Image (spheres, rainbow, N blue to C red):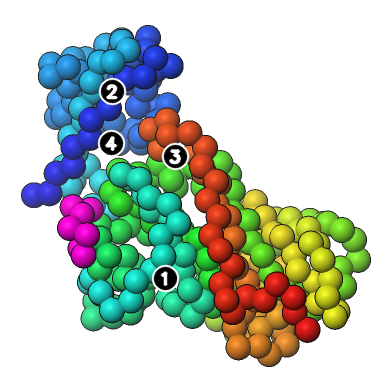
């Protein structure tokens, strides 16, 4: 059985808190906290202590996890070494990679191995890391840019909570057709399944869910506008549907009425997130890909 063990030296700002309070602060889910307590899988300075124990500066907290502590403990992505994906940021718990446009996020069958998660698994294997990739969020196949991937099952529910609490900010760049009516705006229409085509999503479609997209016009060139976009929600095709619904489809978006281009002009430019276990706030930005123009005719 696979186990995971993590060691933390207690920083001054965490001194005086109980073990339980620190786990809650770190967003370790109740189910996993319960497993640690019941199995007595944690120590402070090598000694088993109660969760009510108050921690002191420079004490060492060690936690050990079993596979059955997690809802998804296994990462079953077949490693593929044929393509290297650029890394924008990495620590012991997660990696942010730069996905090319046209690359799928994850496989849909056990034999499929030409996806981002397969290439990341191959990179971990090539570097002899004793970790595996776990999907945290996704971007469309046609979209390029920054994607967070967990390296351990422990941080998956932590990152999920940060996403739900809108503590992780994802900023996109998009070229759209037309001149925007104002410098910035908010689109707040619900998004559901397109009644005519279940591959697509539509404003006020079937089973529509609340969706909010913020946009800012950076500049306009030859009747095309470059927008900076931030999401409050993460509905499928949200940016594409919202912008098309206000008459400004993304250039290259054949599915939602955009004018034809070799690729979808949507790029995940920046991710800002609180790093797990008091790692501070990190802003991660990658370079614009060569096929995403600075000026668009």
Left or right: 263 in relation to 82: right
Q: In 3D space, how far apart are the residues under numbered discs 2 and 1 (Cα atoms)?
A: 35 Å
Q: Nearer the viewer, residue 248 or 268?
A: 268
Q: Which residue is mark 4?
A: 32
Q: Residue at x 52, y 37 (%)?
A: 281
Q: In 3D space, how far apart are the residues under numbered discs 3 and 4 (Cα atoms)?
A: 19 Å
Prevalent SS, magenta region: loop
Quadrant of res 29: top left
Q: Which residue is mark 2?
A: 9
10 Å neighbourhood of mark 4: few (<14), some, or many (≥20)? Answer: some
Q: Residue at x 28, y 49 (%)?
A: 152
Left or right: 178 in relation to 126: right
Question: Which comes before the other along the chain, label 3 or label 4?
Answer: 4
Instruction: State how many labels appear.
Output: 4
Q: Residue at x 41, y 70 (%)?
A: 105
Q: Secondary structure at mark 1?
A: loop
**Residues at circles 3 and 4 in contact by the CB criterion of under 8 Å:** no
**Residues at circles 2 and 3 in contact by the CB criterion of under 8 Å:** no
Q: Quadrant of the C terminus?
A: bottom right
The tag on residue 275 is 3
Q: Nearer the viewer, residue 135 or 216?
A: 216
Q: Which residues are magenta?
A: 125-131
Q: Secondary structure at mark 4?
A: helix
Q: Is residue 192 visible?
A: no
How far across and how far down the image is residue 225, in percent? 80, 71
Q: Which residue is mark 1?
A: 105
How far across and how far down the image is residue 177, in percent? 79, 78
User: Closer to the observer: label 2 or label 4?
Assistant: 2
Q: In 3D space, how far apart are the residues under numbered discs 2 and 4 (Cα atoms)?
A: 20 Å
């Amino acid at each position: 059985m696979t186990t995971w063990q993590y060691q933390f030296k207690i920083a001054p700002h965490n001194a005086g808190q109980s073990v339980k309070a620190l786990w809650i602060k770190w967003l370790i889910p109740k189910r996993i906290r319960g497993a640690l307590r019941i199995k007595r899988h944690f120590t402070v300075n090598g000694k088993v202590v109660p969760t009510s124990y108050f921690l002191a500066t420079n004490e060492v907290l060690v936690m050990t996890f079993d596979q059955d502590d997690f809802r998804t403990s296994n990462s079953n992505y077949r490693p593929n070494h044929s393509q290297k994906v650029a890394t924008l940021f990495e620590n012991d718990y997660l990696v942010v990679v730069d996905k090319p446009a046209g690359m799928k996020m994850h496989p849909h069958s056990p034999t499929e191995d030409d996806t981002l998660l397969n290439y990341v698994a191959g990179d971990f294997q090539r570097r002899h890391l004793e970790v595996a990739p776990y999907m945290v969020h996704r971007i469309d196949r046609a979209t390029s840019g920054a994607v967070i991937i967990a390296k351990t099952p422990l941080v998956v529910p932590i990152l999920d909570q940060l996403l739900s609490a809108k503590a992780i900010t994802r900023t996109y760049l998009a070229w759209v057709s037309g001149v925007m009516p104002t410098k910035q705006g908010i689109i707040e229409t619900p998004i559901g399944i397109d009644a005519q085509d279940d591959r697509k999503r539509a404003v006020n479609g079937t089973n529509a869910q609340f969706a909010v997209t913020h946009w800012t016009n950076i500049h306009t060139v030859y009747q095309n506008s470059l927008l900076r976009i931030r999401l409050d929600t993460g509905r499928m095709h949200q940016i594409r549907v919202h912008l098309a619904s206000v008459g400004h489809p993304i250039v290259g978006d054949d599915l939602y009425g955009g004018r034809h281009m070799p690729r979808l002009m949507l790029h995940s430019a920046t991710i800002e997130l609180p790093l797990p276990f008091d790692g501070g706030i990190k802003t991660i930005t990658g370079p614009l890909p060569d096929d995403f123009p600075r000026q668009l005719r």
